[in-house]
Image (cartoon, rainbow, N blue to C red):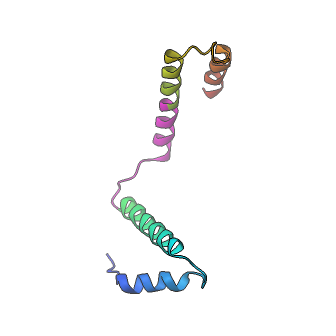
Amino acid sequence: METVNIKQAAQQLIDSLPENSTWDDLMYAIYVRQAVETGLASSRDSKIIPVEEVAVSAKVSFWERLEEFRQENNVEELGIDDDFLEGLRDKSH
């Protein structure tokens, strides 16, 4: 694993910013770099979730939340046609 000289990396980051950059621009650039480095490290360490697994999880979560909404609310009173919600479910399969 390559050792990073943090002062050199910070200087390169600062040098890459436009002359009229703000402190917020600098903080954002640092945040993005750190997020990318964290993601790359997670990938190297196999601490990632396959996209397909995330997609399935999000889809299941959506339908669970929709069903909770339907149980907690009178959709007819809200002006939502129950057939419309069923149509959403049919199109998603």
The stretch of residues the image draws in magenta is 45-61
Which residue is at a point 50% across and 68% down the rendered structure image?
28
Image quadrant holding the C terminus, namely top right
**Left or right position of 54 against 42:** right
Picture coordinates of residue 43 (x, y %)? 40, 59
> Toward the viewer: 72 or 88?
72
> Toward the viewer: 81 or 62?
81
Which residue is at a point 37% across and 64% down the rendered structure image?
41
Which residue is at a point 52% across and 33% down the rendered structure image?
59
Image quadrant holding the N terminus, namely bottom left
Residue 46 highlighted magenta (yes or no): yes
Instruction: State whether residue 82 is above or below residue 56.
Output: above
**Left or right position of 14 against 4:** right
**Left or right position of 20 against 13:** right
Picture coordinates of residue 86 (x, y %)? 63, 17
Picture coordinates of residue 78 (x, y %)? 63, 18
Magenta stretch, main secondary structure, is helix
Instruction: State whether residue 44 is above or below residue 80.
Output: below
Residue 70 highlighted magenta (yes or no): no
Instruction: State whether residue 60 is above or below residue 43.
Output: above
> Toward the viewer: 71 or 35?
71
Which residue is at a point 49% across and 46% down the rendered structure image?
51
